[in-house]
Amino acid sequence: QKEVEQDPGPLSVPEGAIVSLNCTYSNSAFQYFMWYRQYSRKGPELLMYTYSSGNKEDGRFTAQVDKSSKYISLFIRDSQPSDSATYLCAMSLYNQGGKLIFGQGTELSVKP
Amino acid sequence: NAGVTQTPKFQVLKTGQSMTLQCAQDMNHEYMSWYRQDPGMGLRLIHYSVGAGITDQGEVPNGYNVSRSTTEDFPLRLLSAAPSQTSVYFCASSYQQGVYEKLFFGSGTQLSVL
């Protein structure tokens, strides 16, 4: 079993829809949770990060962490065609020198 | 600033050949790492470095070597290429900001081993 599980999709939604992306994990020691966005043929870029349980909002994006259930989510409100990308969740312990554990990534397509 | 620069962008090798993937960063980050990305597997850590002269293995280190002689450069060497090493390779550099570690990725090297 992988440490981090993420449904690879693909997920296709109409423009303006609310998108929910999710990951589950098995290592209860993870403290830091991140979402990366990767456009086709590009490197991943950090979208959001959260520490421990709770919610964090940044514009149309909300990251949610439930450590008791070992479950994290990313919500995208009012989705746009420019949000079409692969979204990867990632997790780590503290100060790991670049050691992140990634999910498989979910491919999202937002149709105009 | 250029950020994280990877070369080459594309490479085709024959089984058994060796090569070096180059990675350089100009952000003075202490941490650097190499990941490979395969369909359905996400990103998997190959090797990482917490500073010049210090390297360690990640999840999938077999068949790869690294060294870190300077803060800026972190090359990845394929010793004897195998078809299983066909993948997209990403180099990243990172720093610690408070409790968060922020990774910055290069644009990737697409490698095919025939």
Image (tube, coloured by chain):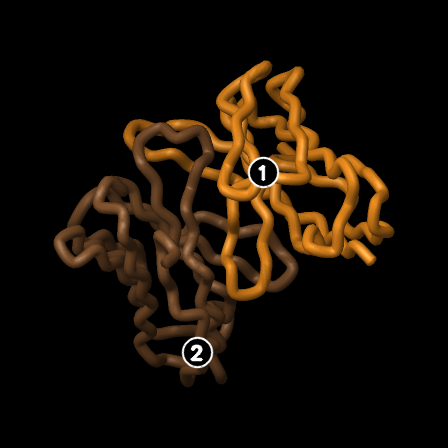
Residue A73, percent from left and from top: 27, 62
Residue B23 visible in the displayed image: no
- What is the secondary structure assignment of the residue under circle 1? loop
The residue wearing badge 1 is: B61
Q: Is residue B18 left or right of residue A75?
A: right
Tell me which chain appears orange.
B
Spot occupied by residue B95 in the image (x, y as percentages of width and height): 44, 28
Q: Residue at x 17, y 55 (%)?
A: A66
Name the element at disc 2. Answer: strand
Q: In the shown orientation, is residue A3 left or right of residue B56?
A: left
In the displayed image of the protein, which residue is found farthest to the left? A68
Can you tell which mark lies on residue A1?
none
Q: Quadrant of residue A9?
A: bottom left
Q: Position of residue A47 (x, y in %)?
A: 41, 52
Can residue A4 be seen by looking at this rendering? yes
Disc on res. A11: 2
The residue carrying pointer 2 sits among few (fewer than 14), some (14 to 19) or many (20 or more) residues within 10 Å by Cα, namely: some
Task: Say which chain tag 2 marks.
Answer: A
Please tell me whether mark 1 or mark 2 is closer to you in this view.
1
Q: Amino acid at mark 1?
A: Pro
User: Callout 1: few (<14), some (14-19), or many (20+) C-alpha neighbours within 10 Å?
Assistant: some
- Foreground residue, A104 or B32? A104
Q: Chain of mark 1?
A: B
Residue A32 % position (x, y): 29, 42
Q: What amino acid does circle 2 point to? A: Leu
- Which residue is more in the foreground, B17 or B103? B17
What's the residue at 46%, 61% (across, down)? A104
At 36% from the left edge and 55% from the top edge, which residue is drawn? A4
Q: Which chain is brown?
A: A
Quarter where residue A62 is shown: bottom left
- Gap between marks 1 and 2, in whole Å? 32 Å
